[in-house]
Amino acid sequence: MPELSYREAVRDALASAMRADKDVFLMGEDIAEMGGSMGVTQGLYEEFGVERVRNTPISEMAIVGAGIGAAMQGMRPVVEIMYEDFLTLSLEQIVNQAAKHRFMSGGQLKVPLTIRTQGGAGWSPGAQHAQQLEAWLVHIPGLKVVFASSPADARGLLWSSIYDDNPVIFFEHRLLYPIKEEVPEQLEPIPLGKARVVREGTDVTVIATGPLVHRSLAAADKAAEEGISVEVVDPRTLQPLDEQGLVDSVKKTNRAVVAHEAVTRMGFGAEVTAVLQEQAFDWLDAPIERVGAKFAPLAFSPSMEQFVVPQPDDVLAAVRRTVGRGK
Amino acid sequence: MAKVEKRRAPSEDTLREFLREMLLIRRFEEKVEERFRAGELPGFLHVAIGQEAVAVGVCGAMEDGDVFASTHRAHGHTLARGTHPNAVMAELYGKLEGCSHGYGGSMHLYDVERGNIGANAVVGGGLPAVVGAGLAFKLRDEPRVAVAFFGDGATNTGTFHESLNLAQLWQTKTLFVCENNEWAESTPGWQHSPVWNDMSKRAKAYDMPSVKVDGQDVEQVYETTKEALARIRAGEGPIFLDVETFRMHGHYIGDPQVYRSKEDRSEAAEQDPIVRLREKLQVSDEEWQALDDEVHEIVEASVEFAKNGTDPQPEDALKNVYA
Amino acid sequence: MASEVKLPRLGQGMEAGTIVKWLKAEGDRVEKGEPLYELDTDKVTQEVEAEASGVLLKIAVASGEVPVGQTVAVIGAEGETVTLAEQAAPAAAAPEPAPDATPEPAPEPAPASAPAAADGERIKASPLARRMARERGVELASLRGTGPDGRIVAEDVERAEAGAPSRPPAPAAPATLPGEVESVPLSGVRKTIARRLTEAWQVPVFQLTVSADMTRANELVERVRQLDPDVRITVTDLLTKVCAQALRRHPDVNVQFAADALVRFPNANVGIAVAAPHGLVVPVLRNVEQLSLADVARARADAVGRARENKLTLEDLDGGTFTISNLGMFGVEQFVAVLNPPQAAILAVGATEERAVVRDGEVVARPMLTATLTVDHRAVDGGPAADFLRTVKAYLEEPGLAL
């Protein structure tokens, strides 16, 4: 099986879709010759040309809005927002327009737009280049939200996002781009809304997204040495959420930890926790733990960044607390 | 609605048709005000009284396949493009038979079959999508144009500027129709824009060609639009129509317009586009009465239709969220 | 055709009962009239007989409190299929110290309410542990939690269950070391006793004490025994008869205090307090004023015998107007009994013993019995009560007067 990095996997999904379908085209800042600030779209401009790989001015509202307009006319644009933090500039178009056209028209329109963006901490990006805002987007009826943590997942899920007839926000993370993994020879589409058990275990379920999937796996290895068997589950699609998949795992292990890099308070993890306690209350042998960033903007200095961002040891400590062996 | 002739200057028959349509919009809007005051219509409503010529002239010039997005003041555009008064009135009453099936209301009238891709309650909110549609037509090499209606107030929003910039940069097949009625709700033009009395400057900032239009002269509106659309269709890039018009009533139904002088209001009334066209066509009193009666009947019927319409089931609120 | 076995109403005011133990198993052949299960009501534990013959196809309620009328089993022909409508599951057996008789509805995934411990403290246990405890009949209060903050977790329940004795009606034995405090759950009878005596304790009472010379009484008992050797008359029987006659003479004492009336009874139904294996019970001998001494003895023997075997029925316990409690066999000289509500009077009888008394100025030894009457002052005043007691003493000292 070929090995692809996460970055290459995203690129492969884009290229495959664009080859298969003339209606798929890209818009974003610096995505053409430069190949994107994270290098994801490298080579696409050369293959597909200036009409289909379009560099845009710094106009997040217009970029996303133009994507909405083209999508409503039946095309399948993929818009790249350079940093997740800049999603904020286009939120009016995402929330008031893209998410609602189908609904307000009584079903006459669809908006098959995909918005790709990347965010998160790592390498001291500073407070305005490091946020994880998935909690805002999963809260809006009409939007779908995806956050893959591995190359095979990214490739299969991006393809499915492009071909979903609804606006999809596809989150990537800068620390994930270099991760390599063996992927199927042929692109295998992965349906939205299905979680994946990344590691099986019996004592506690850790539900994790993005980089926290990998940090949870590291914590699970350490926990195994202490005789604690950890199951790691990646929801992959945040909206719609595979509630059944998550609940099944927790019913098996009787304990849960929810981990994401985004700020813990009022985060996506809080929703997952609520779902688990509603549907698996009588299976819980311990309170559900949450692991996430502490409640502060991200400081610049590396030691401060390290303190705020959740690390494998934070996941391990939470795991220990659920089995009653930690403070 | 009679098919509009391709010859630029409209024939007298066409003009009579325009008169009828403008009067229909006028009476429809008056009826809407009346029904709103009677407490029958939920939500916010903004009537286009005084601006009928812009709606009829621009929409009359559009061809099948063209699309447009309107604003919160959308009844005129929607009716002018051919959506039946029954469907519009039913939407205002929140019925399933409404053009948005009760999901949108006055500020979210959609009729995709007739190219109406949605009225927008967010000022300037619909512009980027029109640019996107114009981009799609260009990428697919289709002889279609996307038309954006907006007011002078919208020319200050970020979406307006980003949209004009991108449209001109990418030469999308987009027509920008600025209905400058010199009021952004209660704020007069001079108070909200440094270029309020010459909106062409807005277009100029983006190197976009603009044309000034007397919005109360439906013939001029029609002719200018026809020509602009032809140029855009031919790939000459987007055009900005700087349309001067008058809002004869308040911003919303019930607006007491405490902010507006009597002179301003009477000046607006003097610019009634329907009166102007009637005078131009020298319509006799009998003819006028007959026309008015005909239009009244249609409007009354639409209210009946709407009132007898079907209320959506409460659970319908959860449909159409996802495709 | 299968017939449903429903919990019978065995007495006035009975709303529920607790099934203690099944005497037949599923699949057993049952004959009409055969005892089917043991039922604990407010007053008594008794066997309930089958009302149909056939095979016990299904036991719907193995144990626990059940409302009157609810189906507890099905009897039918061999091989018949049984479908029962959904009904409320009983509260858990003995280990659940529910304060009132109404049964709880089927437990939902909501947590079992923390046993309302006397000190009012909430028991910390995980939802899983609560559910397991509920399902397995393990009492949370008896567990020690090993989770954080002393929380009871699933492991603790499992450990406890492994060490607990099988039921029913085993009190939940905590898996603890010898020498530690044991918590024995209350039986239905004990709960009832507690409740009724608490009520009684709130009644304003006074006590009168009298001592009687039992010389003549003892002689009489001896003579009657010789006359009727089969009927073993006892002093208690004489006391019972004497009290009944005294009540006839002093009807003011044969009353009960009700909310707005004084209820007067024409007959003397005398209850005799008996220490039965499950606790105190008071079988009632009816219309004693009409019975001969021998009849009284026979009735008393039968009632006490059945009491000791837990075979009393509600009818045996109902309708008393006066009670005698005798602790003389334990050597108690004198004591004060608690009223048996709603009765207005109870006589506490001590042992007959030789005492030094003064007769005609001389100290002599006589068999003396001391009795104390506890009276509900709301219903009976001191004078009438004293009068009554004087009569009792007189009858005891000269039994012929009671004729």
Image: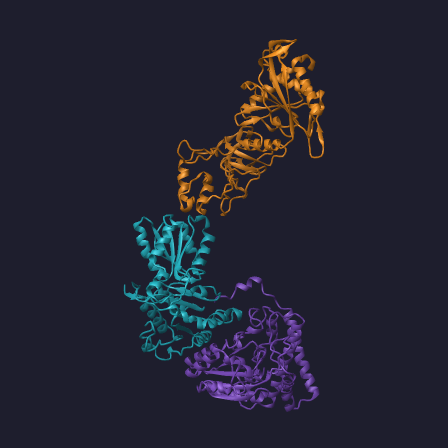
Chain colours: A cyan, B purple, C orange
**C382 over A143 or under it: above or below:** above
Q: Please state which of residues A125 and A117 is positioned toward the viewer in this rendering.
A: A125
In this rendered view, identify the residue nearer to me: B202 or C209: C209
| Residue C335, x across and y down, in percent | 58, 22
Q: Residue furthest front?
A: C361
C84 vs A103: above or below: above
User: Quadrant location of residue A22?
Assistant: bottom left
Please tell me whether residue B36 is drawn above or below residue C81 in the rendered image.
below
Percent coordinates x, y for residue C359 in the rendering: 64, 10
The answer to which image quadrant residue C343 occupies is: top right
Report the label total.
0
On screen, residue A99 versus residue C207, left or right, reads left
Q: Which residue is pictured at 49% across the width and 46% down the height? A: C111
- Quarter of the picture containing the N terminus of chain B is bottom right
Q: Nearer the viewer, residue B19 or B184?
A: B184
Q: Position of residue C368 (x, y in %)?
A: 60, 14
Camera-side residue of A206 and C239: C239
- Residue A262 visible to the viewer: yes
**Coordinates of residue C105 in the picture (x, y in percent):** 54, 43
Horizontal side of residue B23 vs B123, given as left or right: right
Asked whether residue C403 is in view, the answer is no
Q: Is residue A239 left or right of residue B16?
A: left
